[in-house]
Image: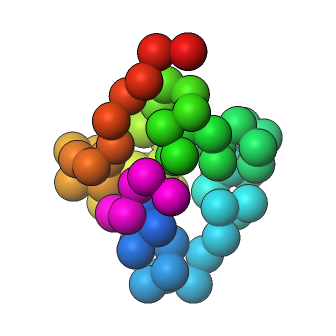
Amino acid sequence: MDSPNVERVLEQQGRTIAWLAREAGVSVAYAWRMLRGERPVTAEFRRAASKALGVPEDLLFSDVIEKAS
């Protein structure tokens, strides 16, 4: 995963990418693609993930490099 901060927080909280995808209202496949850098991480996903995980957005996604599709 290109987003070790997200991965670390999910692991610490005992959560999965499937849970995060549901909370953010996206498919698991789309969430994986965003977190791997295969798709741009949308502002909506950043906000939803931050809220769901209780971690500030700038800390949670400071390591994600957005790539244009």
Q: Is residue 25 visible?
A: yes
Q: Is residue 11 above or below residue 43?
A: below
What residue span does the magenta drawing correspond to? 1-5
Which residue sits furthest top? 69
> Magenta residues: mostly which secondary structure?
loop
In which quadrant is the C terminus drawn? top right
Pinpoint residue 19: horizontal percent, then vertical percent: 69, 62
Q: Is residue 14 above or below residue 33?
A: below
Pinpoint residue 21: horizontal percent, then vertical percent: 68, 49
In the visual, does 29 lie left or right of 67?
A: right
In the visual, does 59 lie left or right of 67?
A: left
Q: Residue at x 70, y 37 (%)?
A: 30
Q: Residue at x 73, y 60 (%)?
A: 18
Pinpoint residue 62: horizontal percent, then vertical percent: 23, 47
Pinpoint residue 47: horizontal percent, then vertical percent: 42, 37
Q: Residue at x 38, y 28 (%)?
A: 66
Q: Assess whether residue 26 is covered by the magenta stretch.
A: no
**Nearer to us in this view, 62 or 56:** 62
